[in-house]
Image (spheres, rainbow, N blue to C red):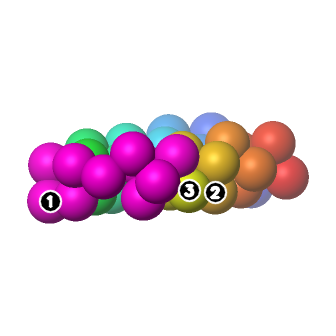
Amino acid sequence: QTTYGTVDYLSLSVDFLWISLVNHPNKDHYWITTTIFILSFIL
């Protein structure tokens, strides 16, 4: 995985997290999304 690809992936993930938080200000949804983001970043 290239550095550019990783940066691009992180940018998309951050955008997704922000959109999810704005559109669904629900703590359960936010934590689920955050958990998925963290897991996908670690894995």
Q: Is residue 26 left or right of residue 36?
A: left
Of label 3 and label 1, which has the lower sequence position? 1
Helix, strand or loop at mark 1: helix
Residue flagged by tag 3: what amino acid is it? Ile
Residue receiving disc 2: 36
Q: Nearer the viewer, residue 35 or 41?
A: 35
How many badges with numbers are in the image? 3
For residue 23, the mark is 1
For residue 34, the mark is none
Name the spot of residue 31 as percent of width and height, x first: 52, 46
**Nearest-to-viewer mark from 2 and 3:** 3
Q: Residue 14's image quarter?
A: top left
Name the spot of residue 28 as percent of width and height, x first: 46, 54
Stretch in magenta: 22-31
Q: Mark 1, residues whose alpha carbon is within 10 Å: few (<14), some, or many (≥20)?
A: few
What's the magenta bit mostly, secondary-structure-wise?
A: helix
Residue flagged by tag 2: what amino acid is it? Ile
**Label 3–label 1 contact, CB within 8 A:** no
Name the spot of residue 5 as percent of width and height, x first: 56, 53
Residue receiving disc 3: 32
Of label 2 and label 1, which has the lower sequence position? 1
